[in-house]
Amino acid sequence: MSFGQNISSTSTPKMPPVCLIRQADDALETCPDGIALLQSLKHEPVAVICLAGQYRTGKSFFLNQMCRKGDVSSVPSTNAGFVVGPTTELFLVSELTKHVCVHQHGGAADNHVPKSDDDDDDDVQHSVHESALAPHFPPFVWLLRDFLLDIQENGLPLTSNVYLERSLQRRDGTSKRNEERNRIRHSLRTLFTQRECVTLIRPVTDEDKLRNASTLPDADLRPEFIVQMRAIRDRLLDVARPKRVLNQVVDGPKLAHLVQSYVATMNSGAVPDIKAAWEYVSDVTCEAAFVRALDTYKTAMESNTSMAQVEFERVHKEAQDGALVVFKSESVEGDARKRCFQKLKAAIAQTRALQINALQEKSTLLCTDVVERLAQQWLQSPIDSGEWDDIPSDGRALGRGLTPFFHGYDEAGDGPSKTKVLVQFVKSDLPTILDQF
């Protein structure tokens, strides 16, 4: 399963198609390049269109026509550009991750019911699983390629949608092949409650040109084909909406987690549980949002170079507000958000407490150094040199002698330990110094 990045009408730089899911020897596996691309689409709602069909039936040509405006580089001719391979597991994963499904084949629909790899599966179990999955399946568009017939019944014209519904009705017969097709018809009716049919004529009538249709300019294509293709393209882009799971809009990283969860579940032999898968996505997303928000807080706090308590509190408030904005924008609603929000509040409080302790230690070291330096300069040195010998023992005169010391400390001391260090000095060290006077 591969995809391009953008097929809107807005001009964007070209990019090559990237593989998202592939069939390994005995299991599905996600591809690092595809996951990385989705992870880069943070906060970007993603609408996924999947094209399914038999091998070498023109899927890549159709996708290149969808990308005709030059947004995506040419899609290779094998399993690319929102193309799903033939396995049931890969098809199911694609159905659960996309928003529009396009199934294409050539000719009439009656004899082209999709094949199943699960001939021996229990029908009742299928019905139960299908009923549970149906609300999460996307709109279904049946594309009839190279269609030349007039759609009629009993000589009366039918719309393409009525023709599709007729084709999905149960057929009489007891053969194993007929029963299998009837079961698939029932599955399509059950899983895809919103469905429609569109037709598309051959792009060219010349067989030689048809083999190389992907290289032909518009001028060499049939005008009717170009008109039909444009209408189909506009219709699919109109139907496509941002992917939602349990009413939550899915961006690139969330879709990546969702795909990984589905693949792991399918590889274990179980049927994907939408709610469980989304809970996994929610947990992973909210944990990532918690980490990002806490990093935002810590980074902002590291920018604080002041030891003033008021400035510390101002920076803390701005950092906390910024962290909460990040968390709210990157997390998703649910129990995981509530849990991670409480976790974030506790982590911020703990980080704040640690930084306050570190600030107090830093302030203590600074203020202790300042008070010792000023005490030596304005108290101990004058006493040792006899400069204070002529100062009267009057308290006011002594106060005037201490004024430069206190003024200097008020200017140079800083931080939450400023008052504590000064009080400690006045209580213990100052009397000892003055006893020498």
Image: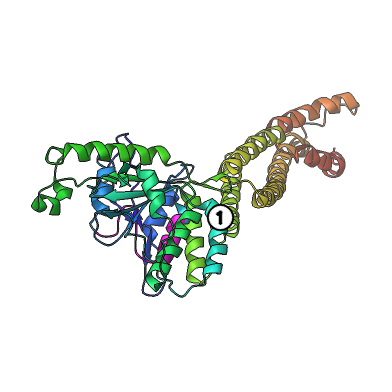
Q: Is residue 387 magenta?
A: no
Q: Which residues are magenta?
A: 78-95
Give the residue furthest to the front. 154
Specify whether residue 433 is in view. no
- Residue 75 % position (x, y): 25, 52
Q: Residues within 10 Å of mark 1 (few under 14, many from 20)?
A: many
Image colouring: rainbow
Above or below — where is 116 with respect to 318? below
Specify whether residue 335 is in view. yes
Dot 1: element: helix
What amino acid does circle 1 point to?
Val
According to the picture, the residue beneath numbered tag 1 turns out to be 281
| Near-viewer residue (323 or 187) | 187
- Residue 197 % position (x, y): 36, 46
Q: Quadrant of the C terminus?
A: top right
- Is residue 2 found left or right of 360 in the rendered image? left
- Is residue 345 found left or right of 389 in the rendered image? left
Q: Quadrant of residue 304?
A: top right
| Residue at 50% across, 55% down | 190
- Residue 106 % position (x, y): 26, 54
| Near-viewer residue (45 or 246) | 246
